Amino acid sequence: MSRGRWSLLRGIGIGVVLTVAVAAAALYLCVEFGLVPANADARPSRFEGWVARTSLHATLARDAKNLANPLPANDTVLLAGVKIYAADCAVCHGDATGRPTLVGYGLYQRGPTLGRYGVEDDPDGVIYWKVTHGIRFTGMPSFARTLSDTQRWQVSTFLKHMKALPPAARRAWRAVHVAAVPASLIPPRRSRRFR
């Protein structure tokens, strides 16, 4: 390799390293001086939304595709799922009325109101994965340490079938009530950013 070509490649390499270093330092300083919003009521940047959505979809495609529900969708399982949902999920995701809850409406990102916008079209494994692991960059917690594997499958089974429940489970679901946001405070709905 000629000396001129080597100098050119070396200069390009140094330029790339310096560019990356300056970008990393700028990002660090933005975070260190509080220029990246940390408040839950700030609208996320497009980049932050893209990172969260892309990572979630890639993770679900990799980790949830082979998870098969071991439980039948019978009254026992569905009633247990409703009970778990009422205790652990309804405060954020609401009840059968489909109105946002006080807690869910204040979250960043807002928890989907599952009584209105359910997850029946999601594969069982995806629902179970979200219940088990939670979703980073949202208020969705992991229930891996607080609910047994069977309980996580029970609530996942309920969520998968919540729009077509047998009579006993439907009655139990409709009996779940949580404090909802007054309709006058809810602006027109935009598309969901996380799913």
Image (cartoon, rainbow, N blue to C red):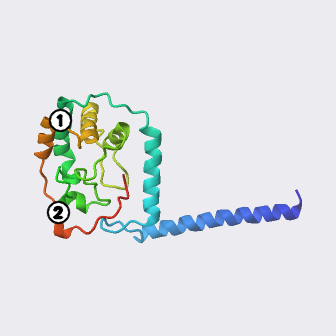
Residue type, numbered disc 1: Pro
Mark 2 Cα shell of 10 Å, populated few (<14), some (14-19), many (≥20) = some
Find residue 180 and report its horizontal and vertical position in percent: 15, 59
Q: At 33% from the left edge and 31% from the top edge, which residue is drawn?
A: 69
User: As rendered, which of 180 and 149 lies closer to the eye?
Assistant: 180
User: As rendered, which of 36 and 33 lies closer to the eye?
Assistant: 36
Query: Left of 194 or right of it: where is 149?
Result: left
Q: At 72% from the left edge and 61% from the top edge, which residue is drawn?
A: 13
Q: Is mark 2 on a helix, strand or loop?
A: loop
Q: How much space separates mark 1 and mark 2, taking CA atoms?
A: 29 Å
Find residue 18 and report its horizontal and vertical position in percent: 65, 66
Quadrant in which the N terminus appears: bottom right
Residue 84's image quarter?
top left
Badge 1 or badge 2: first in the primary sequence: 1
Residue 146, can we see it? no
Residue type, numbered disc 2: Val
Query: Left of 111 or right of it: where is 76?
Result: left
Q: At 17% from the left edge and 29% from the top edge, which residue is drawn?
A: 76
Find residue 115 and report its horizontal and vertical position in percent: 22, 50
Residue 186's image quarter?
bottom left
Instruction: Tell me: residue 74, above or below residue 130.
Output: above
Query: Left of 60 or right of it: where is 152?
Result: left
Q: Name the residue under label 1.
A: 166
Find residue 149 and report its horizontal and vertical position in percent: 29, 32
Q: What element carries label 1?
A: loop
Q: Name the residue under label 2.
A: 181
